[in-house]
């Protein structure tokens, strides 16, 4: 009954004329909308992770967006709006996971779709997935998996046997616990979880970085703007400012060398930022830096802390529409 009432409310709020009024209120003052995605997989892929959007859901979202927005590059969104122009919306993707090459690139080529892709460079350089992707990969097995990190002061969890959103609700707290641990411990703790989880019998395409050649091909698309996302995907507010500056500068240096493009935009990993980090980005000459806050970009938002709305696997289209208007 509760689920049915929720679906009824979603349909009511997204039906005209109410949705039109909500949209008018949200878009007053000509804000820009920036959406944050991570990666894509075909619908048949049983990969229970919020960051992995089904390809058909992404296509449906693009169709819905084009009804009411101009989908533009980040640079176009940050420029003064033309009189009478439709609302501007930017699609961004974080990290640099292989699904962007395998699945996003064909879509943007076919749809003439501008996107910004923020790449964290260490995984491209080494070919080794970051700790959080390794943990998500390890917890995709069938049946029930018991993870006990009590000796590390992190707790114990049971994952499974359910699939879909219920499984993600079990994986999410594990990732959050590891994020709160000292940054230098993330890889070791992730390795412990992977060892406890054992082999994944389920046939999935694991989360993994693009190869350098794939990144170069992606960056060569006229529809793609490449941005930096730190070198090691560090939570920059958890490390020293000199370390943070070095990570930011290293990611830009590598990306410029690999792609031959100027790297003018940055996204804070996990959205974590501070005034000191904003000052570093400004000093390094980045044109913008983005955070994660579920709101639109309005006049007065600092260029080094532009909000993005996070989009993931478990939002049905009506819920997606409501998030665009701040609900």
Image (cartoon, rainbow, N blue to C red):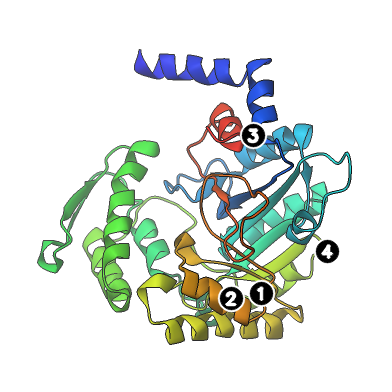
Residue 187: % across, % down? 32, 74
Residue beneath label 3, please? Answer: 26
* Element on which disc 4 rests: loop
Residue beneath label 4, please? Answer: 222
> Is there CB contact under 8 Å for labels 3 and 1?
no
* Element on which disc 3 rests: helix
> Is there CB contact under 8 Å for labels 4 and 3?
no
Q: Which numbered tag is attached to residue 286? A: 1
Q: CA distance from mark 1 to mark 2?
A: 6 Å
Residue 130: % across, % down? 43, 70
Query: For mark 4, does the 10 Å Cα neighbourhood hold few (<14), some (14 to 19), or many (20 or more) residues?
Result: few
Residue beneath label 2, please? Answer: 281
Q: CA distance from mark 3 to mark 1?
A: 28 Å
Q: Earlier in the sequence, mark 1 or mark 2?
A: 2
Is residue 280 at least partly visible in the picture? yes
Which residue: 28% across, 71% down? 191
Q: Earlier in the sequence, mark 2 or mark 3?
A: 3
Mark in front: 4 vs 1: 1
Q: Nearer the viewer, residue 37 or 327?
A: 327
Which residue: 49% across, 51% down? 51
> Is there CB contact under 8 Å for labels 1 and 2?
yes
Residue 66: % across, % down? 77, 37
Q: Which numbered tag is attached to residue 295? A: none
Q: Earlier in the sequence, mark 4 or mark 3?
A: 3
Which residue: 79% across, 59% down? 223
Q: CA distance from mark 2 to mark 3?
A: 29 Å
Query: For mark 2, does the 10 Å Cα neighbourhood hold few (<14), some (14 to 19), or many (20 or more) residues?
Result: many
Left or right: residue 39 versus residue 272 is right
Q: Earlier in the sequence, mark 3 or mark 1?
A: 3
Which residue: 44% across, 51% down? 203
Residue 60: % across, % down? 67, 35
């Amino acid at each position: 009954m509760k689920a049915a009432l929720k679906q009824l409310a979603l349909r009511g709020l997204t039906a005209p004329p109410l949705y039109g009024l909500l949209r008018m209120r949200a878009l007053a003052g000509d804000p820009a909308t920036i959406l944050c995605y991570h990666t894509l997989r075909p619908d048949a892929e049983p990969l229970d992770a919020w960051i992995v959007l089904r390809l058909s859901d992404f296509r449906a979202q693009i169709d819905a967006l084009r009804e009411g927005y101009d989908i533009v590059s980040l640079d176009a969104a940050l420029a003064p709006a033309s009189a009478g122009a439709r609302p501007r919306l930017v699609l961004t993707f974080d990290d640099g996971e292989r699904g962007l090459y395998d699945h996003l690139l064909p879509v943007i080529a076919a749809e003439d779709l501008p996107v910004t892709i923020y790449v964290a460079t260490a995984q491209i350089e080494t070919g080794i997935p970051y700790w959080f992707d390794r943990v998500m990969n390890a917890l995709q097995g069938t049946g029930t998996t018991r993870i006990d990190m009590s000796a590390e002061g992190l707790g114990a969890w049971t994952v499974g046997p359910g699939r879909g959103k219920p499984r993600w609700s079990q994986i999410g707290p594990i990732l959050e616990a590891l994020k709160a641990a000292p940054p230098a411990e993330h890889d070791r703790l992730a390795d412990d979880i992977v060892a406890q989880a054992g082999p994944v019998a389920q046939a999935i395409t694991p989360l993994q970085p693009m190869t350098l050649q794939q990144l170069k091909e992606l960056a060569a698309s006229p529809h793609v703007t490449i941005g930096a996302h730190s070198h090691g995907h560090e939570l920059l507010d958890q490390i020293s400012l000199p370390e943070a500056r070095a990570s930011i500068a290293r990611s830009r240096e590598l990306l410029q060398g690999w792609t031959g493009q100027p790297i003018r935009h940055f996204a804070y990993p996990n959205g974590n930022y501070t005034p000191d980090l904003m000052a570093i980005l400004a000093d390094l000459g980045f044109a913008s830096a983005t955070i994660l806050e579920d709101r639109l970009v309005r006049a007065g938002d600092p260029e080094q802390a532009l909000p993005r709305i996070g989009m993931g696997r478990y939002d049905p289209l009506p819920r997606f529409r409501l998030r665009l208007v701040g609900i």
